[in-house]
Image (cartoon, grey):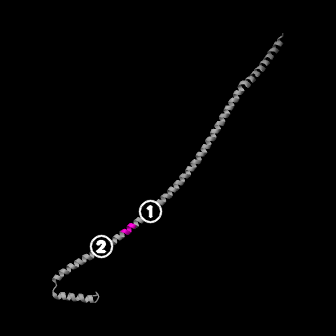
Amino acid sequence: MSDATYEAIAEWSQIVAAILFVIALVVIWNKYLAPAVLASQARKNAELAEAEQRRDAARAEVEKAQAESAAADSDVRAISSRAQGDAARLHDKILADARSEGEHAMLGAQGELERARAAAREKLRSDLIERAMEIARNAAGRLDDGTNDRLVGDTVDTAERGGNA
C-alpha cells in the first residue's frame, strides 16, 4: 500500500469521522438537547403567560381602584356640597332665630319701658297730690274766715263755669 492509499484512507477517515460526529451531534440534539430546549421554552412561555395574566389582573385592579377613587371623589364632592348647603341653612336659621329673639326682647323691653313710664307718672301724680295736700293743710291752718269764704266762692264759680278760669 502506497502513501496515496494511506492518504486517501486518512482523508476518508476524517470525512467519516466528521459525518459520524455530525450524526452524533444530531442524535444528541434530538434525544437530549431539543427536548430540554422545548421544555425550557414551554416553561418560559408558561411564565410569560402567567406574567401577562398577573399584569392583566393588576391592570384590572388599577382600573377598579381608579373607578372607586373617582366614585369616592364624587362622594366627597356631594358630601361637601350637602355640608355647605346644610351650613348655609343652619346659618340662616340661627340668624332668623336670633332676629326673632331680638325682636321679642325688644318688644318686651318696650312694654317694660311703657310700664315703667306709667308707674313713674303715677308716682309723680301721687307725689304731687301728697305735696299739694300738704301745702293745702299748711295753708288751711293760716287762713282766716274771709279768705276761706273768698276761696270757696272762687272754687264754686269755677266749678259752675265748667272748670274754665
34 up-or-down from 121: above or below? above
User: Can you give x and y, in whole percent of width and height, for residue 35 in the image?
Assistant: 71, 27
Q: Quadrant of the N terminus?
A: top right
Secondary structure of the residue carrying numbered label 2: helix
N-term mark: 1 or 2: 1
Give the left or right position of residue 78, taking residue 146 as reference: right
Residue at 38 percent across and 68 percent down: it is: 106
19 up-or-down from 132: above or below? above
Q: Quadrant of residue 33?
A: top right
Magenta stretch, main secondary structure, is helix
Tell me which amino acid carries mark 2. Answer: Ala
Q: Which residues are magenta?
A: 104-108
Give the left or right position of residue 48, taking residue 75 as reference: right
Where residue 95 is drawn, which disc sits there?
Answer: 1
72 up-or-down from 163: above or below? above
Q: Quadrant of the C terminus?
A: bottom left
Secondary structure of the residue carrying numbered label 1: helix
Residue at 22 percent across and 77 percent down: it is: 131
Q: Residues within 10 Å of mark 2 (few under 14, many from 20)?
A: few
What residue is pinned by disc 2? 119
Tell me which amino acid carries mark 1. Answer: Leu
User: Can you give x and y, in whole percent of width and height, for residue 113 in the image?
Assistant: 34, 70
Where residue 31 is drawn, which disc sits there?
Answer: none
